[in-house]
Image (cartoon, grey):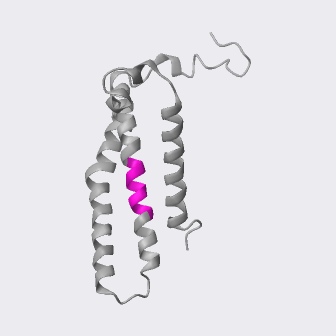
Amino acid sequence: MALIPSQVLRVAILLSYFSILCNYKAIDMPAHQTYGGSWKFLTFIDLVIQAVFFGVCVLTDLSRLLTKGSENQEQERQLRKLIGLRDWMMAVLAFPVGVVARHMPVFSLYVGQPNPSHFSPVKLKGWRKGNVP
C-alpha cells in the first residue's frame, strides 16, 4: 500500500497549482501589461495546463469513489469517458508542454556550456572558509 493515497496527493498538487496561480496573478509585472499578458510565457501556459489536468484527475477520482459499487451502465460509461479525457490530456497536453517548458531550456543551456567554469571544484575550494574568488 502506498504511503500517501494517490487521491490525497492529487488534491494537494491541485491546491498547490491554484495557490501558485493566485500568487502569480497577484504580482504586478510590467511584462504582464503588454500584448498577450502572462499568456505569452510558456511556463504560465504550462502551469494552467497542469492545473486543469490535475483538476480532471481529482474529478475522475471523485467520480470513481461515488460510483463504486453502482451497477448503473450510464455512470460507468461516463467514468470511462472521463478517464479517456484524463489520459488524452496527459499524452497530448500536460506531458509534452511540461517537457518543453521545464527541461528544454535547461538542456539547451547545458549543451551550450556543459562544464561551466564557475562550477569548477577548483574555484569552489575555499567556499566554506569564505575565500571565494
Placement of 28 over or under 63, stated as above or below:
above
124 falls in the magenta region = no
Is residue 103 visible in this depiction of the protein? Answer: no
Q: Is residue 51 magenta?
A: yes
Q: Main secondary structure of the magenta part?
A: helix
Task: Measuring from the top left, give residue 40's x and y in whole percent.
Answer: 32, 29
Residue 100 at x, y percent in the picture = 31, 38
The number of callouts visible is: 0
From the viewer's perspective, tell me whether residue 27 is left or right of residue 53. right
The residue lying at 52 percent from left, 28 percent from top is 27
User: Taking 44 as reference, is 132 left or right?
Assistant: right
Boundaries of the magenta span: 50-58
Can residue 115 be seen from the camera position used here? yes
Looking at the picture, tell me which residue is in the foreground, 38 or 3.
Answer: 38
Extreme top residue here? Answer: 133
Task: Classify the position of the C terminus by image quarter.
Answer: top right
Residue 94 lies, in percent from the top left, at 33, 49
Whether residue 125 sits left or right of residue 36 in the image: it is right
Could you tell me which residue is drawn at 51 percent across and 17 percent down? Answer: 118
Q: Is 24 above or below relative to 82?
A: above
The structure residue drawn at horizontal position 49% and vertical position 59%, both measured from the top left corner, is 10
- The quadrant of the rendering that contains the N terminus is bottom right
Instruction: Look at the picture and state if 19 lies above or below 112.
Output: below
Where residue 98 appears, x then y in whole percent? 35, 43
Foreground pick, 69 / 100: 69
Image quadrant in which you'd find residue 77: bottom left
Quarter occupied by residue 70: bottom left
- Extreme residue in the right direction: 129
